[in-house]
Amino acid sequence: MTTSIAIIDFGTITTRLLIVDAHGNEIDRDQPVTRMGADLASTGKIGTDGLSRVEAVLIDYRERMDRADVGTIWAIATSAARDAADQSALVELVKQTIGVDLDIIDGVTEGRLAFAGATDGLITNDPSKLFVVIDIGGGSTEFSYGTANDGLLGVQSVDIGASRVTSTYFENDPPHAAELSAALSVIQLHLDDVVREMPSVVAAISSGTVIGVGGTITTVGAVEIGLVGEDRTALQHFALSIAAVEDVFRTIATEPRDARRYNPGLPENRVDLIVGGCCVLVESMRHLAIDEIIVSERDLLDGAASDLLERLGPSPW
């Protein structure tokens, strides 16, 4: 009898796994960096190298899911797969390796799942309290808002992210001032789109709580507190002020890679992407007048797991 489900998220930077039991309790979680979208900016494709890195992770995941007696798998792909000319190759790889169809979700679904994951379990005495969730990924960023009473009220997805900004605007290490300025200017334009398409998010930010998810926000939080080691529980619901984010940004944006990598809390596999991600984070906080953002380790994976369990019903097995 199977007793668990699995979510696999194929992102631009990471290929992540979450296994939970029938009650939503976590059994296994991993988020290795596979850089699936590393060549997208130059080739428009994931390419054989990116697919090979993903395949190696999937072989490991297949064994882990077997050990956990996983009965249902939901494999979802986001920005890189949406953009890739060879997305069919990824679909085929997933089918051959783990035996399921790949669900390439749109930005609105991505934002909905991130909102559900980030807000699940939050305790509030005011069911009308507004929450805004910002999910900074490798290729896109989702802005969503809602309340405990009404659930999700709006989502907007824009094509800015840590990998996309890095590959499009940065030719030097550290980036030149003109490169940073160009990146921040384009991010501003995307944020203008968010405000125009979803004007209520501004009011939600001013009166509610803003939550940040994704590798950029957790990395900036880890750098701010100087996190050392694998225990990341200290990051959950850590409050990042705009002053702290600006300070981290100034530091990492002016350091070359060889110096940047020594910042406590900055993983080696994100050293070359964190400046691009930080551009998205700091400009979002500036442009949308966000004074403080709450770090959440719970995100799209957790929202997808809850969504799948709900669809399977109370007794899926």
Image (cartoon, helix red, strand yellow):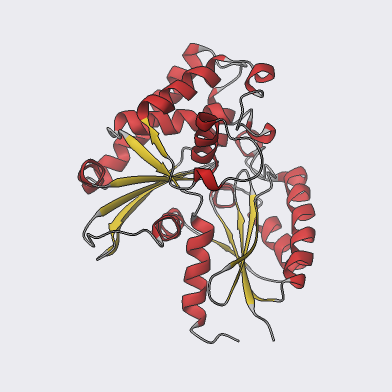
Residue at point 63%, 42% (across, down): 37
Is residue 8 positioned above or below 169 on the image? below
Image quadrant where residue 45 sits: top right
Residue 264 visible in the snapshot: yes
Q: Say whether residue 284 is left or right of residue 231.
A: left
Quarter in which the N terminus is drawn: bottom right
Residue 165 appears in view: no
Q: Position of residue 205 (x, y in %)?
A: 26, 43
Residue 31 on image: x %, y %: 65, 50
Lateral position of residue 79 relative to residue 294, left or right: right
In this rendering, the answer to whether 148 lies above or below 234 is below
Compared with 309, 257 (above or below) is: above
Q: Position of residue 131 (x, y in %)?
A: 30, 52
Q: Nearer the viewer, residue 301 or 90?
A: 301
Total of numbered circles in the picture? 0
Placement of the C terminus among the 4 image quadrants = bottom right
- Residue found at x 47% / y 70%: 307
Q: On the rendered structure, is 304 left or right of 207? A: right
Question: In the visual, does 204 lie left or right of 241?
Answer: left
Q: Is residue 82 above or below residue 148?
A: above
Percent of width and height locating residue 130: 25, 53
The residue nearer to you, when weighing 96 against 60, is 60
| Residue nearest the observer in this picture, 36 or 133 | 133
Q: Residue furthest top?
A: 177
